[in-house]
Amino acid sequence: MKTSWTTVGSVALALFLSGCGKEKLERAWSFMPNMHEQESVRAFEPEPTVKDVESRTGSAMRQPVSGTVPMDLNQYKLTKRDAAAAAQNNPLPRSMSILKAGQRAYNIYCIVCHGEKGKGDGNIIPNFETPGFSHSGREYNSPNHQFPPPPALDSDRIQEMSDGDLFNYITKGGMIMPKYDHLPTEMRWSVVHYLRVLYKASHATEEEVKEFEAAGSKYEDTDATSVVNDWR
């Protein structure tokens, strides 16, 4: 029995050593040669599917599928604070599903600075009632780390901006606000609609509040998740 184990160990050691090459990147055995040595071609080399090299024609590079666009394609040509931006009309209807989609996008991308009601009191913004702390209670290590408060979205200044101006500002950014041109166009327009709702919520009359509460049950509570996902 002792001899048998010695023989097995010797064979295993021989097999192990036979698989070692002279260099670390050298393989003595290749268990999947078709994966280890794949036929690769460059973009403008002849079509590789024909085995006879002399008979190859065409190009290895494939044509893009229909609808393909460059990753850095920018279809929005207006510049920051472009006067032509004001003439843009919001192409989306002010429906409940669109408003909920705008609210969802706002809560993802905007609320951290602008706050839930658009008053510029987001979680990372300094709370001047408690110096050195943000509205979320986070303590700043240094005054240099504090974010300046953004403009209140329920102000008359924002209300006086056209839908096109708001869309342009969201797209191009401004001051320390980053641009959001990477978001789908429809998502940005839905946020514009939601900003109007934020303003109205802060300036509604008592009669309008009662009217809204009375009509609230008539609106269909559409889930905005599917709408937003369709825009991604």
Image (cartoon, helix red, strand yellow):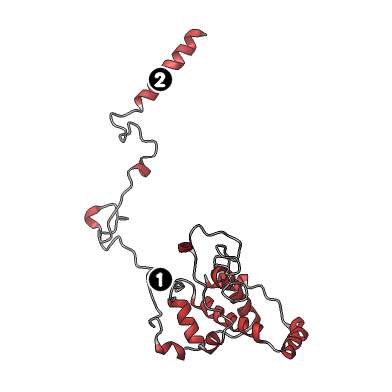
SS at circle 2? helix
Q: Which residue is labeled 1 in the image?
A: 68
Of the residues shown, which amino acid type is indicated by label 1? Thr
- Image coordinates of residue 32 in percent, x first then y, are 39, 39
| Category of crowding for the residue at label 1, using alpha-carbon neighbours closer than 10 angstroms: few (below 14), some (14–19), many (at least 20) | few
Left or right: residue 160 versus residue 220 is: left
Vertical arrangement, residue 209 with respect to residue 22, above or below = below
Report how far apart the C-alphas of labels 2 and 1 lie in the structure: 55 Å
- Image coordinates of residue 21 in percent, x first then y, are 31, 29
Foreground residue among 59 and 230:
230
Q: Which residue is labeled 2 in the image?
A: 13
Residue 63 quadrant: bottom left
Vertical arrangement, residue 8 with respect to residue 169, above or below = above
- Circles 2, 1 touching at the beta carbon (< 8 Å): no
Foreground residue among 112 and 3:
112
Residue 15 quadrant: top left
SS at circle 1? loop
| Category of crowding for the residue at label 2, using alpha-carbon neighbours closer than 10 angstroms: few (below 14), some (14–19), many (at least 20) | few
Residue depicted at 30% across the width and 34% down the height: 26
Vertical arrangement, residue 67 with respect to residue 197, above or below = above
Residue depicted at 27% across the width and 63% down the height: 58
Foreground residue among 32 and 24:
24
Left or right: residue 82 versus residue 205 is: left
Of the residues shown, which amino acid type is indicated by label 2? Leu
- Image coordinates of residue 65 in percent, x first then y, are 40, 69
